[in-house]
Image (cartoon, rainbow, N blue to C red):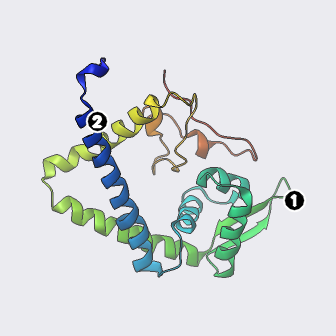
Amino acid sequence: MDSQGLISADTVDEFYKSLSVLSRAVNHILQNRAVEETLGAGVSYSKVQVLRLLSRRGGQTSSQIARFLGIRRPSVSQITEALERIGWITSRVGDHDGRESIHELSDEGQRKFFMVRRQQRHLLRNTMMLADESDVQGWSGTLHTIAGLLARSDRAFKDYCLHCGAHADGTCVLIGGEADCAFLRRRDVGKRTVIRKRA
């Protein structure tokens, strides 16, 4: 569909509505509710995201966590200090830069992250069991395609990164799903990490 005239406004609006509903359902059920049911009220999803990052990638600096969450370092300090107070992460002085702390997951933090992940998997399995198996097989590919095309359609940016932590295998859907996630691969501190979109 190269011509914009082939797609009606009603079709575009319905597609946007569907994406909005999906986004809100994911946010409410797989993020907020899953966290609340496993860890209790008052634990933000940002804290769980930090646990996920540290679980997958090991020790991270505040700058790396800030890039991952897409927030400023003072906000990261509040999150990491809160996680350290409750014993879910530990912090130590950086090996190469004494001014930068390395944050690592504690055994308790790992256990808490696995609790959330187990609940999310349970909810997703229930969802998949309600659908036809033939439909389920194509869901991931379709969603990856939509995310990649949506990012490519955003001409306001030459570079774009979802700061999603990529997938378990470290690949980025925005650049075709085969390339390494530039965010996770990059270890230097204080520089903006971007993933170049295809033209």
Which quadrant of the view contains residue 186? Answer: top right
Q: Can residue 199 be seen in this view?
A: yes
Q: Position of residue 135 (x, y in %)?
A: 17, 47
Of the numbered discs in the image, which one, if any, rests on residue 98? 1
Image-based side of 169 in relation to 136, left or right = right
Residue 4, percent from left and from top: 31, 21
Which quadrant is home to the N terminus? Answer: top left
Q: Residue placed at 40% from the left, 61% from the top?
A: 27
- Please report the residue visible at 57 percent of the width from the left and 68 percent of the height from the top: 47
| Marks 2, 1: nearer the viewer | 2
Name the residue: 14% across, 52% down: 133
Above or below, 91 against 179 in this view is: below
Residue at mark 2: 12
**Residue 159 horizontal/vertical position (percent):** 58, 32
The three-letter code of the residue at mark 2 reads Val
Q: Which residue is drawn at 70% across and 69% down?
A: 78
Tell me how far mark 2 sits from mark 1, CA to CA.
52 Å
Residue neighbourhood size for the residue with mark 1, other residues' Cα within 10 Å, grouped as few (<14), some (14–19), many (≥20): few
